[in-house]
Image: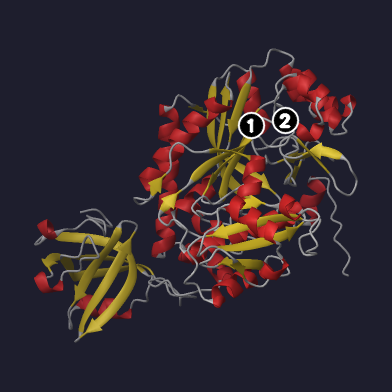
Amino acid sequence: MHRYRSHTCGELRSSDVGTDVRLSGWLHNRRDLGGILFIDLRDHYGITQLVARPGTPAYEALDKVTKESTVRVDGKVVSRGTDNVNPDLPTGEIEVEVGEVELLGAAAPLPFTINTEDGVNEERRLEYRFLDLRRERMHRNIMLRSSVIASIRSKMVALGFNEMATPILSATSPEGARDFVVPSRLNPGKFYALPQAPQQFKQLLMISGFDRYFQIAPCFRDEDARADRSPGEFYQLDVEMSFVEQEDVFQPIEKLMTELFTEFGGGQEVTSPFPRIPFRESMLKYGSDKPDLRAKLELTDITDVFEGSEFKAFAGKHVRALAVPDVSAQPRKFFDQLGDFAVTLGAKGLAWVRVTEDGSLTGPIAKFLTEENVAELTKRLSLAAGHAVFFGAGEFDEVSKIMGAVRVEAAKRAGHFEEGVFRFCWIVDFPMYEKDEETGKIDFSHNPFSMPQGGLEALETQDPLDILGWQYDIVCNGVELSSGAIRNHEPDIMLKAFEIAGYDRETVEEQFAGMLRAFRFGAPPHGGIAPGVDRIVMLLAEEPNIRETISFPLNGNAQDLMMGAPTELDETRLRELHLSVRKPQPK
């Protein structure tokens, strides 16, 4: 028999009754019922119940072993009997009557329980992450991640893509976030940068003649944590394709996402095909460029309705309305709670009216609306008895943010929100440029390396703020999974695009010398995308925080509490790297 096990803890069934077996695993739980010990033994594959009877060496040994110790047991498989079957366990029809026990690794007192999902401080969980990963939910999430990545690889190969590796040590890149830098021992005073994304390398692969590339790529960005963003390191499915237009990129990615979320989504419906929503339309209708389409409500721009109005709350401001049907049975509390919700987002309050049976409006601001206002709102919003209308007024971006969140919250509270579905969409037609309201400077709004729609002619003849880029995002249930673009592969167009944003030719030639040199040797039209693996798994696992899908994440302050990183270097190492440390002065 094998030194440690003949079977795993998830393998034994009623057909194994009478068999002598050897199992190894962690002591998950222990119960003393009438003098008989019942032990749950856990390994990667599952749980098997052990039985140790009083007066036996096995009883004496298992009675003393602390929870989460690793043990090896020898015993015989017996039936639990019909009345004692545990239907929640695959091994629930049997148990193992233990004859011999070997303690393989004793466990110290635990900082938190493993066999329950009791609330534990996150800092403590990350400090003892190796224990946290033993818990059922975390173990399941990490195995889901493994399965998702394996499936992605298989599906990408089937779609005709080739997996390739790109460098980790490279030059700094203008991805928008801060780089993590690595000092060079052999080149004093110079630094490598960890890649924020393999962007330039995957484009260079296309220029080198490789047609369809993908990689499960580690990316490094020195940016603050969010619920859907891990600080420091993350993984993405990096994709690039040659001789393609926008729809050519959409097709394989849409097929991949549909199959992936169908395979791992637990039976939840997946929308297909994914709607294409222009950026400006998305901002107006949903208040966001990552709309949650499970909310079956839309915003309406009614700024023109109140042009010249004497109602000071709306006059001269951008005004958005949200019509919510079927709220006649909702109490005043419904309206007050939505108002409180808007205040948490920075609003001063939330104006609203309700449509009565005779079609008139009632509510806090009804008296300020003229007959013409009421008639136009009724027509524009298709109002009927039982509707409520919520209003937001202010600057465009502020109103979009607040009313976009109110849209989703109102849909959930009023029963206009779909559960158990994955609603995907593509956001397209992003503006190429934006104006800084304070300085008036024109700058890139999204991705400076995207091909402008209309090419060089558009750059030379159109108002920069009217130019759209071949840029796109893929969004699922209000979570942005990825940005992508058809790349600007023509040097003249690239130089002109940067010129509009205030970069002179010499600066561009210096900062992007490698890419421009490559473009001048016959670059194919190409485009790509890079969906975030961590966010995909977060959605599939139905977790609210991305750290729950990563084996060893950093905390919100970009610290590894388990390994003690980041650490200081001693003087010997600093001298070897030609570095000196200048710490900030205490305030």
Q: In this rendering, does residue 549 appear at all?
A: yes
Quickly name the residue at label 2: 449
Q: Residue at x 69, y 52 (%)?
A: 302
Residue 355 placement (x, y as % from top left): 56, 65
Q: Residue at x 70, y 26 (%)?
A: 453
Amino acid of disc 1: Ala
Q: Relative to 366, is 202 above or below?
A: above
Q: Quadrant of the C terminus?
A: bottom right
SS for callout 1: strand
Q: Nearer the viewer, residue 15 or 314?
A: 314
Residue 151 placement (x, y as % from top left): 40, 39
- For residue 254, side relative to residue 318 (left or right): left
Residue 15 location, quadrant: bottom left
Q: How many marks?
A: 2
Q: Quadrant of the N terminus?
A: bottom left
Q: Nearer the viewer, residue 45 or 543?
A: 543
- For residue 228, side relative to residue 463 (left or right): left
Quickly name the residue at label 1: 485
Label 1 environment density (alpha carbons within 10 Å; few <14, some 14–19, many ≥20): many
Q: Relative to 534, is 153 above or below?
A: above
Label 2 environment density (alpha carbons within 10 Å; few <14, some 14–19, many ≥20): many
Residue 535 placement (x, y as % from top left): 53, 49
Q: Are marks 1 and 2 in contact (CB under 8 Å)?
A: yes
Q: Residue at x 16, y 65 (%)?
A: 94
Amino acid of disc 2: Phe
Residue 583 location, quadrant: bottom right
SS for callout 2: loop
- The image's colour scheme reads secondary structure
Residue 345 location, quadrant: bottom right
Q: Relative to 502, is 561 above or below?
A: below
